[in-house]
Structures are given as structure tokens and as C-alpha cells.
Image: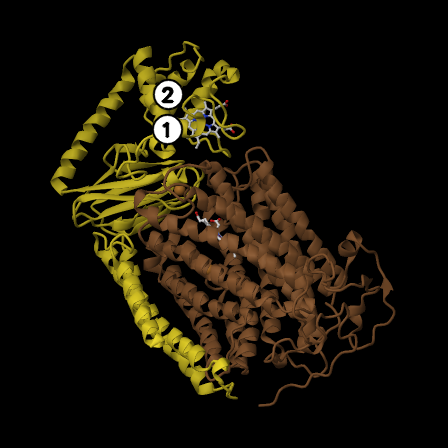
Chain colours: A yellow, B brown
């Protein structure tokens, strides 16, 4: 009777476990691309193979533990070798694995075929944000996490997409083949969106490839998955997949905006507008290392407030922001920020937090340095 | 009345061996003179049993320190949001936890067992190189004091994960990284010297009549592990030296801006790192292969195939390293190669599990605490093996990699794998060390709380990983909250239940049911022919070994 209850409990338990393991939010998502579905298929196949092997192996084991208890007077047998058995249980797993390797190889080949893309997007990891550039389209922007600090510290209620929301998502067309080219400006990052089954490391000095053809419009969320320093946990990826026509309109608008930004280089900017713009840039790009109040995080991240040496050297200040500091975690911003943004942020730093040098840095000055 | 002895002190006479007695295997070793007592006795000891005890105490202390760091991590992850620690410190905790557990707890734990048991199991009077043995041990406290002290240095301790990928660990690392490198060098030297000693002992000092294929599997697996150590610790030393150069001498091995190659770092690291994970599990296979036959009262099934399986695992372990790097952008052929070799390594591992189960089949099984831990090892290690098999499927690994699924996998093989095996060994050999049986009641409590704690901690991590939670993050999205809460509760249970382990050890050292020379009815190896507790000097006259027929 007790045995029966045990068996029923065991079966019930396993059914419950497997069911929950397959439920939404407990398992790998099916995703919205061909590749993601293939991967999900491989995952479930190997999972069931493991379940079956597990049932057989643990079945025999628990049967033996139960049946051959010394307390029930079991006497041990004397066999301790059998070459046939050894060969059999080497060969069977081998065959199962060959059977598994074939579909896995096919999927891998498909994943590696990034040829003939309709759109190329350069993804650059930076501590701790993503920079996206639509190659050949003159459109690029930075994507920062937008979850407010209050929610992280528990001072405000956490929103639905806590930690998985950004100020500017990566917009992509559905039904077109998009190729990603991934690299990094500083340490190794990894760009991952589970629903797209794309996880690819972004490595300084390397350009990696991956691709996706999204089938359903929607918002897909992911995160950086390679430890990249302090804010590694706060570096989400958000992809917004839209129908191709909508994407074309969006891209055209972004192009115009980029052109307007470029023309901003030619005119004289006033202190106020530079300060407003500079504060925005500073808080979204620089504050993660130098802190919102410019106090930095010595010894590694220098303070920009109360830094008289820096205030003396306007040229070095500009050069540092443009070229970064090689051998230290200060990135070069020449390619990720526009001349207007660089001018604005330097102006801001030279006049905020009591620095009050009164210096104005014009975008045209930055432009000429960049050339 | 139980004698008041310091924990784990096996013998009352502070005798000290005067010369390198080990080199005289085969002769009667005469004239021990009395060496220093007190602290100096432990500092200067060249006795394999005392050094073994030192290693085991060291390992246990590190297990608790590393465990406290893990509990800080789990406490922060109990709920979404940042409550207790800031990300800087969180990263130091995960990194230190990993480093301490791997290099400070598991590896020295196995070396301690090797020191105690290999001479006893091969019938040797001591390790082949006793003074070197003393040196290997005392390097460890130096290395780990240095490592722990980095937490107090400006900028904090290592915060780049126990895999310390460059350039996060070079250009972007805290200033204390140079000390981290030094401490790893010292720990590495200790491992290499220990491995040399073990190989020399096993190859030269077996009792007359004991052929290689007569050696207990713990000896075999340690022999193979020692070769792995000698092969890969220098690789680790190489990679950290390159880091040292990049940080302090302006080279650019891993600095892309200077023409260096961050991917090369990962290749070198994992060329060390994958064999390293087998270094942490092969001796465990040996332990389980001793305990299961003892309590099944039946000879180990497939002894020869166990030896061959261990050797093939060791060889294959040099050919699979890039399965940790499927997402770094390797060429397709490389992905395929490493996927196939990794799948292949599952075969000999499976053979081992099948052999253990065939040993149980038609045995006469009893369930003393060492056996409970060994059986839990078989089941839970196999579960870790299953998730390993899943991770081997390269396309799927793109989804699993660097998520909590991986954290679940390696903890299943390390905690109920390596750590349970060490605990099983302690319960199994304590009667030989102390002359007393461990308290069964305490043992059972320790076992069941540990099993429940481990599964509650690590099983939900499979789900949070599959659902998309990356590893090494101090805060997480709301859909992972329940899994994390369960894990944190499990971790607290597992952590506190280890106090029972300490309590059991202390009680066992102080007293308890007296154990005869052959403490377990079904035990067969040479260590059970010497008295319990084993006197400080054993096998001064080598025993004649008679190998078992049929
Ligand atoms: C009380 C038991 C333990 C608990 C609760 C625990 C928990 C954890 C947690 C929460 C992490 C960090 C995961 C992440 O964010 O990446 C971690 C990492 C790790 N643990 Fe454990 N752990 C335990 C025991 C062990 C043991 C015994 C070992 C070694 C045999 C071990 C080896 C590791 C390693 C190698 C890492 C990776 C460290 C890194 O990311 O750099 N753990 N553990
Ligand atoms: Cu990251
Ligand atoms: Cu590996």
C-alpha cells in the first residue's frame, strides 16, 4: 500500500514538474524566427532524450536500492565484469548522440549563413549602453536603459518592464533579413534577445556577424549577457519589429533628423542651448562613470567637478572626450557622439557643478578637430 | 570521558618524522626523534596525515568563507531591486565566491584527501616528497590571505568573474588586480607541487605486488588528475602573466587598441579551465567508486572500464574548451568540432554512471551516511550531466550561454557533485582518521537538509535561465522573482545545514562509537588493514599486496 502511494506521488510529481517546465515563463521561448523555432525544437528534443535516459537509469537505480536492501536480507551477487554490457552501453549513447548531432549541425549552418542581408546594423557595446548604426543610412543612436533609479532603489513601484526598457529601441523591419555586425568600444559585451535567438558577443577589435528575419511585429526584450562591469545588469536590449513600410517611413524621418543635426555644426550656439543639450548627453552617456554630480568614482573614474587641473586645460578636455584614454576605461566618443553633442557636453562639464569657467565650445570647433 | 583534543588531531603523540622517511619505502624506518610541538609542529610537519588534516581544515574554512560570499549574493537576489549591496560589491562577491570555492575549497579538499588516503591505499609510509608536501600546503594560506585582502584595497577586489575575461580584468580592472594575479600564481605553484608529489608517490611507492590495475580507483583518478594539473596550471600561470604584463608593463596581449586579442584570452583561459573542471570531479569519481561497493557489499562493476573511461575523459577534456565560447564568433568548423567533441565526452561519463548502478544491482545495500552522500552524488551529478549534454548542442547553447541555466548546470556538478563527494569521503574515512564512527543521526540530518537545500537552490535556476535571466547580475526583471526567492531560501538552508557538518566532525574527533581497523563491513582496500585511528606512521614495513582473483 505504501509502495503504491509512493509510485502515485512520484508520477504525479514528475507530471507536475514536466508540465510546469514546459509552461510559459519556465521554458525557452519559442521565439519569432525560423532559427529560434529550430533551436527550441533541438532544446526540446535533447530535453526529452535526457528525460527518457533519466527514467531508465534512475529507474534501475532506485529499483536496485529498494530491491537489494540488506535490511531485507539481500545477499550480494559476485559478478563484476561484463564486456558485452560495457560495449552496449557505450554504443547506444553514441548512436543517440549521432542522431542528435545531425539536426544540430543543420541548424548551426543556417545560423551561420548571414549572406544576402537586406539591411546591415552595426551594434556597438559600450559600458553600459548599446550604440546602433544603420549602415549606409547615416542613422545612428545610443540606446540607454530608461528604468528610473527610484525603481531600482525601491523608492518607487517597479514598472511592468522593469530593467528591460530603453529610451530608444532598435527599430527593425519584419520579413527582411537583417544582418548584425557586433563590436565593442571597451570590454566584451554580449547582445541577446531570447525571442530572436540571437546572442552574440561584442568584442573590442573584432566584428562578429549574426542575422535575423523576424516574422511578427512586436517588442522583443533582452539583456547584455557578458559580465561587462558595474552596470552589466542594467544594459537591456529592446527591439521593436515593425512592418517594412512603417520601417521605411521611420528610417526616412531619422535621416532627416540626422541631417538637421549635421547642419547644426555650421551655426553659432548659445550658452543656454549648449548647457541644456549637454546636460542631456552627460546624464545619458557620461554619468554612469563620472556620476550625475561629476564626483566620479576615484581611483578609477576621476571627478570632473572640483578638478582645477582639467579646467585649466580646455584643449586636453576636448581631446579626451574625442579620443578617449587608451589603456583606461575612458571611451573615445568621436564616432558615437555627433560634433554638436561633444561640444555641448564639454561646455556643460566646464560650467556645471561650480566649474563656471564660462567657456563655450562650438560644434564647428569640434568638427574641425574631427577632420 | 572523551579526551580534550584540538579538532581533527588524529594522535596524541606529537612525534615527528626526522628524515625523508618516505624515500625509504621498502626498508624499516627507524629512529623517529621528537620534533617541535604546538604551532611549530604543524608549521614544520612532513607527515602526510598531518598535512592532509591541514589541507582539510583549510578547505573547510574556505568553504565557509566562499559560502558567506554566496549568501551575500543570494540575499541581494532575494527580491528584485537593489537592497543590500551595490553592483560594485556584488560583482566582487560573485567573483570571490567562485575563486574561493574552486581554488580554495574544492581543490585543496581533494588534495587533503589524497594526502591522507593515497599512501594508505597504496601501502606507502608517506608521500614521496614530504618536505615539498609541507611547502605545497603552506603556500595556500599565503595565497588566500593575499586574495582576501584585496577586498580591503582601494577600488576593491577582483570584480570580473572567476573567469576574469580580458580586457575587463586588465585595462578596466581595479588596482588590486596585480595582487590577485600574484595570489593565483602562488596557489598554482602549490597545485603543481602537490601534483608532482602525488604522481611520484603513486608511481614509485606502491606496496610490493600492487600493479597499476590493482590500485583503488581513488588512486587512479588522482593519478590522472595530477597529470591534468601539471598540464594546465602552467597555462593558467601563462595567461595571468600576460595580464600582469598588460596591466603593468604596457604590453597589449589582450588590448585591442594596441593590436591585442581579447578572444585569445578566452582560448587560453578555457584551455586551462575545462580540464580544471575535470580536476574538480575526477577524484570525486574515485571516492564514489570506493563507497558504493563498500555499502553494496559487492565489487565495483567494470573496474577496467572505469579506468579507461577516466583516461578518455582526461584526454577529451583538452579538446572541448571552446564549448565555453560558442557565442564569441568562432568559425563554423570550429563550432562543429567543439560540439562533437563535447557530445563525445558524455559517453565515458555515462559509462561511469552505468557501472555504479550495475554495482548496486544485486548487491546487499545499506544506507550509512557516506552511502547516502554517494547515492545523492550519482543522481544529482547525472542531472548536472544532462544539462551539460543540453549545453553541448551548440545552436541551443546560444540561448543557454551566460544565463542561470549555466549556473544551475555547474552547481549541480560542483555542489552535489564535487562537494558531496568530499563530504561522503569525510564520513567514510573519519573512523580511520579519528577512531570513532561519525554520529549517524547528525549525519542523516546533515544529509537531508543538504539535499533539500541544494535542490531548492539550484533547480529553479534552470527555469530562470531558460526564461531569460542572465548570470552575474545584481538585479533582475520581475518575471524571475519567484525562482530567485526559492533559490535564496534554499541557499540559506544549505548554508546553515553545513554547521551540522562541523558539529558532526567535532563530535567525531572528540569521541563516539569506537571503530575497528576495518570500520565498514564491505570495505576492501589497504587503508582498512591499519588500526583505527591510523597511527602517525603506517606501513613502515610495506605490506604484501595480494590482488583479488576473478
Ligand atoms: C551555498 C552554496 C552555494 C550557493 C548558494 C551558490 C550560489 C552562487 C551564486 C548566486 C552565484 C552567482 C551567479 C551569477 O550571478 O553569476 C554563484 C557562482 C558560482 N559558484 Fe556558487 N554557490 C554555492 C556553492 C558553490 C560551490 C561549492 C562551488 C564550487 C565547487 C561554486 C562555484 C561557483 C562558481 C565557479 C561560480 C561562478 C562565479 C563567477 O560567476 O565568477 N558554488 N554561486
Ligand atoms: Cu554586460
Ligand atoms: Cu567545459
Q: Is residue A193 above or below residue B387?
A: above
Q: Is residue A278 left or right of residue B85?
A: left
Mark 2 Cα shell of 10 Å, populated few (<14), some (14-19), many (≥20) = many
Q: Circles 2 and 1: CB distance less than 8 Å?
A: yes
- Identify the chain of the residue marked 2, using the numbered disc in the image: A
Percent position (x, y) of residue B424? 56, 67
Percent position (x, y) of residue A258? 23, 27
Q: Is residue A206 left or right of residue A276?
A: right
Q: Is residue B306 left or right of residue B518?
A: left
Tell which residue pokes out farthest to the front in this image: B1
Residue at the spot of label 2: A345
Which of the pair A258/A229 is nearer the observer?
Answer: A229
Mark 1 Cα shell of 10 Å, populated few (<14), some (14-19), many (≥20) = many
Percent position (x, y) of residue B13? 80, 63
SS class, disc 1: helix
Residue at the spot of label 1: A285
Dot 2 or dot 1, earlier in sequence: 1
- Identify the chain of the residue marked 1, using the numbered disc in the image: A
Residue occupying the point 21% across, 56% down = A34
Look at the image and tell me in which quarter the N terminus of chain A lies: bottom left
Residue A285: quadrant of the picture: top left
Which of the pair B353/B529 is nearer the observer?
Answer: B529
SS class, disc 2: helix
Tell which residue pokes out farthest to the bottom in this image: B550
Amino acid at each position: 500500500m505504501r509502495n503504491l502511494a509512493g509510485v502515485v506521488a512520484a508520477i504525479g510529481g514528475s507530471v507536475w514538474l514536466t508540465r510546469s517546465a514546459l509552461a510559459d515563463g519556465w521554458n525557452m521561448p519559442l521565439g519569432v524566427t525560423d532559427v529560434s523555432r529550430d533551436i527550441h525544437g533541438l532544446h526540446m528534443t535533447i530535453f526529452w532524450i535526457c528525460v527518457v535516459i533519466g527514467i531508465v537509469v534512475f529507474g534501475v537505480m532506485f529499483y536496485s536500492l529498494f530491491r537489494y536492501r540488506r535490511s531485507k536480507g539481500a545477499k550480494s551477487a559476485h559478478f563484476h565484469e561484463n564486456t558485452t554490457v560495457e560495449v552496449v552501453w557505450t554504443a547506444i549513447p553514441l548512436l543517440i548522440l549521432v542522431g542528435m548531432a545531425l539536426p544540430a549541425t543543420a541548424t548551426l549552418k543556417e545560423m551561420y549563413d548571414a549572406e544576402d542581408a537586406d539591411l546591415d546594423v552595426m551594434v556597438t557595446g559600450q559600458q553600459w549602453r548599446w550604440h546602433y548604426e544603420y549602415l549606409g543610412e547615416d542613422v545612428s543612436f545610443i540606446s540607454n536603459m530608461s528604468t528610473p533609479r527610484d525603481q531600482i532603489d525601491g523608492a518607487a513601484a517597479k514598472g511592468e518592464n522593469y530593467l528591460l526598457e530603453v529610451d530608444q529601441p532598435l527599430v527593425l523591419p519584419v520579413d527582411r533579413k537583417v544582418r548584425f555586425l557586433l563590436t565593442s568600444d571597451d570590454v566584451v559585451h554580449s547582445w541577446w534577445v531570447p525571442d530572436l535567438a540571437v546572442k552574440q558577443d561584442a568584442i573590442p577589435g573584432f566584428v562578429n556577424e549574426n542575422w535575423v528575419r523576424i516574422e511578427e511585429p512586436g517588442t522583443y526584450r533582452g539583456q547584455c549577457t557578458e559580465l561587462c562591469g558595474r552596470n552589466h545588469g542594467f544594459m537591456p536590449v529592446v527591439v521593436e519589429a515593425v512592418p517594412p513600410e512603417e520601417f521605411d517611413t521611420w528610417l526616412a524621418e531619422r535621416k532627416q533628423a540626422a541631417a538637421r543635426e549635421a547642419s547644426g555644426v555650421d551655426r553659432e550656439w548659445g550658452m543656454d542651448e549648449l548647457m541644456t543639450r549637454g546636460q542631456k548627453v552627460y546624464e545619458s552617456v557620461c554619468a554612469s562613470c563620472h556620476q550625475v554630480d561629476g564626483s566620479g568614482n576615484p581611483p578609477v573614474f576621476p571627478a570632473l567637478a572640483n578638478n582645477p587641473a582639467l579646467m585649466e586645460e580646455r584643449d586636453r578636455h576636448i581631446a579626451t572626450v574625442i579620443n578617449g584614454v587608451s589603456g583606461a576605461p575612458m571611451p573615445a566618443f568621436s564616432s558615437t557622439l555627433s560634433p554638436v553633442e561633444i561640444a555641448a557636453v564639454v561646455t556643460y562639464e566646464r560650467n556645471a557643478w561650480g566649474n563656471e569657467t564660462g567657456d563655450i565650445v562650438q560644434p564647428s570647433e569640434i568638427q574641425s578637430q574631427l577632420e | 570521558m572523551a579526551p580534550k583534543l584540538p579538532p581533527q588531531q588524529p594522535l596524541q603523540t606529537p612525534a615527528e618524522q626526522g628524515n625523508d622517511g618516505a624515500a625509504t619505502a621498502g626498508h624499516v624506518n627507524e629512529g623517529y626523534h621528537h620534533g617541535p610541538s604546538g604551532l611549530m609542529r604543524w608549521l614544520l610537519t612532513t607527515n602526510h596525515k598531518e598535512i592532509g588534516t591541514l589541507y582539510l581544515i583549510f578547505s573547510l574554512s574556505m568553504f565557509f568563507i566562499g559560502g558567506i560570499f554566496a549568501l551575500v549574493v543570494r540575499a541581494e537576489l532575494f527580491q528584485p531591486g537593489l537592497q543590500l549591496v551595490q553592483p560594485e560589491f556584488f560583482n566582487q562577491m560573485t567573483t570571490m565566491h567562485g575563486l574561493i570555492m574552486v581554488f580554495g575549497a574544492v581543490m585543496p579538499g581533494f588534495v587533503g584527501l589524497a594526502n591522507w588516503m593515497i599512501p594508505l591505499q597504496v601501502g606507502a609510509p608517506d608521500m614521496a616528497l614530504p618536505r615539498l608536501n609541507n611547502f605545497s600546503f603552506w603556500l595556500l594560506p599565503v595565497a588566500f590571505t593575499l586574495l582576501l585582502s584585496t577586498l580591503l584595497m582601494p577600488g576593491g577586489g577582483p570584480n570580473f568573474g572567476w573567469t576574469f575575461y580580458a580586457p575587463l580584468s586588465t585595462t578596466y580592472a581595479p588596482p588590486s588586480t596585480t595582487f590577485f594575479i600574484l595570489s593565483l600564481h602562488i596557489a598554482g605553484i602549490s597545485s603543481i607541487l602537490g601534483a608532482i608529489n602525488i604522481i611520484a608517490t603513486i608511481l614509485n611507492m606502491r606496496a610490493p605486488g600492487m600493479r597499476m590495475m590493482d590500485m583503488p580507483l581513488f588512486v587512479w583518478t588522482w593519478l590522472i588528475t595530477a597529470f591534468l594539473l601539471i598540464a594546465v596550471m602552467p597555462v593558467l600561470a601563462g595567461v595571468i602573466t600576460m595580464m600582469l604584463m598588460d596591466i603593468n608593463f604596457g604590453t597589449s596581449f589582450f588590448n585591442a587598441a594596441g593590436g591585442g586579442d581579447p578572444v585569445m584570452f578566452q582560448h587560453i583561459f578555457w584551455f586551462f579551465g575545462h580540464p580544471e573542471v575535470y580536476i574538480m570531479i575526477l577524484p570525486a569519481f574515485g571516492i564514489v567508486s570506493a563507497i558504493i561497493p563498500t555499502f553494496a557489499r559487492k565489487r565495483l562493476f567494470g573496474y577496467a572500464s572505469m579506468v579507461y573511461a577516466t583516461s578518455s575523459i582526461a584526454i577529451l577534456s583538452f579538446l572541448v574548451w571552446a564549448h565555453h565560447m560558442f557565442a564569441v564568433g568562432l568559425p563554423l568548423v570550429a563550432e562543429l568540432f567543439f560540439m562533437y567533441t563535447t557530445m563525445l565526452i558524455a559517453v565515458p561519463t555515462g559509462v561511469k554512471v552505468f557501472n555504479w548502478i550495475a554495482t548496486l544491482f544485486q548487491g546487499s545495500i545499506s544506507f550509512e551516511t557516506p552511502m547516502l552522500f554517494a547515492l545523492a552524488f550519482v543522481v544529482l551529478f547525472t542531472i548536472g550531466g544532462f544539462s551539460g549534454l543540453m549545453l553541448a548542442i551548440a545552436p541551443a547553447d546560444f540561448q543557454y550561454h551566460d544565463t542561470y541555466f549555466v549556473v544551475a548546470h555547474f552547481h549541480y556538478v560542483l555542489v552535489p557533485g564535487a562537494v558531496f563527494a568530499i563530504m561522503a569521503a569525510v564520513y567514510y574515512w573519519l573512523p580511520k582518521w579519528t577512531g570513532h564512527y561519525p554520529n549517524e543521526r547528525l549525519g542523516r540530518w546533515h544529509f537531508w537538509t543538504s539535499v533539500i537545500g541544494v535542490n531548492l537552490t539550484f533547480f529553479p535556476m534552470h527555469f530562470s535561465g531558460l526564461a531569460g535571466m542572465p548570470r552575474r547580475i545584481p538585479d533582475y526583471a520581475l518575471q524571475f522573482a519567484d525562482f530567485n526567492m526559492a533559490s535564496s531560501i534554499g541557499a540559506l538552508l544549505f548554508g546553515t545545514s553545513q554547521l551540522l557538518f562541523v558539529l558532526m566532525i567535532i563530535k567525531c574527533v572528540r569521541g563516539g562509537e569506537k571503530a575497528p581497523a576495518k570500520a565498514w563491513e564491505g570495505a576492501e582496500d589497504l587503508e582498512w588493514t591499519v588500526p583505527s585511528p591510523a597511527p602517525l606512521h603506517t606501513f613502515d614495513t610495506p605490506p604484501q599486496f595480494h590482488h583479488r582473483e576473478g
